[in-house]
Image (cartoon, helix red, strand yellow):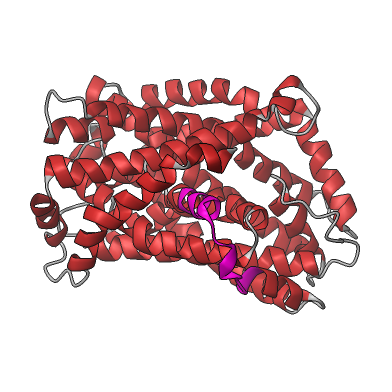
Amino acid sequence: MAEREESGRGTWGSKIAFILAAAGSAIGLGSLWRFPIMVGRMGGAVYVFAYILAVFFIGFTEMLAELAIGRHTQKNPVGAFEAIRPRSGWKYLGYAGVVTTIAILSYYAVVAGWAFGYLYKTIFGLFRNITWESSAALFNRFVANPWESLFCFLVVMGITTYIISRGVQSGIERFAKILMPLLFILMIFLAFRALTLPGASRGVAFYLKPELSKIDVKVLFFALGQAFYSLSLGMGIMITYGSYISREENLVSSAGWVCFSTTLVAFLAGIIIYPTLFATPDLTPEKFEPSLGLMFQTIPLVIAKLPGGFLFGVLFFILLQVAALTSTVSLLEVPVAFLIDEHKWARPKAALFLGGLSFLLGIPSALSVGASTALTRFGFFNKMDLIFGNILLAVGGLGVLIFLVYFWGIKPALEEIRAGCPRFSLEPLWVFNVRFLAPLAILILLIFIKTITG
């Protein structure tokens, strides 16, 4: 283990370390920031229902497939496909995953920078006596200031690059093991407080009472995209993380815990945000729009209503920053592992190069939110999220399933899964899903992509 860590490649120190790191990657801002926005845009509880179905039937199936490929090959996405099918075109699916992670990191780290910005705003007491109007104005001023936004973005990329340069056990694992459990505890507390606010019941109804007649192809597509985004699927992260798992570990329970914890945090994020929104006196339905700043505009309202809200606010945004960093770290780890495995780069050199590249690529995203610019009018940030955070994740996930079924084989995949789980009770369901349900569902939704995205 130490030998591999020194050579640039690493291993997880324990099963719980992998689960916390993978859950941290999956939870991040995908569950806390992006999921509540999509709930508001897609009609509330019906989207929550579709998302849970997508995680259970497709997300778990895909995650187990990616972990099995990663552990079997002990490689990054490019090396993994090449190891199983040498001198074939499948390695280009791995290249696509590497490119996708860099693209997502370039705009995702911008949002992580907002979390850093809100941490120091909390410390300076800017959320005292805050209202929905003043909270929205504060966020809009923040993202419209290019220097402040770029500075926060740079800080996040600097920290991410440093953590990745330290390796798996010294970097990723150490942060996840200590701080991720604290995030769960604080979110449960904030959710309880939100539910006790006067008028919160309307928000609960919006969030938890689905009108199933409203389910359509668009809701299903974006629920699937959110499942892939939240679970870090379809871009090689779980293949890379799987490559650091020993053969004695149980991939089934690990995948299950990651899916469960990610879904729980997404669920709690919605419980915090929507009851708070509907309990806000100065917020009418006409004023509400699930914008990119939804979480940043809402959380201060909850914190302001808590005794000792200052301390809770500081703690929340510290933990939010940690959650964001576990995701930025996982995104950067994929291309770094590629350069280490395939081109024999030293880990610090690979981390510095790719961290700098991601920052440069993210500048347009940082400048496209807030102030009215050509990038804002073009909708650059939202287009990046649609293309890389929805469409290409679905394409990548479909590619992994086709590769496993027709080019690696169900039998060797099951042998890899059984290595740490001799009694795989969900085997018949997983085989059916990986062979039929998951690829067909993704394919059908991609066929309708033009209609869905307008």
Q: Quadrant of the C terminus?
A: top right
Task: Locate residue 377 relative to residue 406 in the image: left or right.
Answer: right
Whether residue 314 is situated above or below residue 349 in the rendered picture: below
Where residue 400 sits, quadrant-wise, is top left
Magenta highlight range = 207-225
**What x and y, as percent, mark residue 296?**
72, 51
**Can residue 152 be seen in this snapshot?**
yes
**What x and y, as percent, mark residue 422?**
11, 68
Magenta stretch: helix, strand or loop mostly: helix
Q: Residue at x 56, y 20 (%)?
A: 360
Number of numbered discs on residues: 0
Task: Locate residue 262 relative to residue 298 in the image: left or right.
Answer: left
Q: Residue at x 74, y 79 (%)?
A: 196
Task: Locate residue 389 relative to residue 118 in the image: left or right.
Answer: left
Q: Nearer the viewer, residue 437 or 353?
A: 437
**Can residue 155 be seen in this snapshot?**
no
Q: Quadrant of the N terminus?
A: top left
Q: Judge whether residue 134 is colored magenta.
A: no
Where residue 39 sits, quadrant-wise, is bottom right
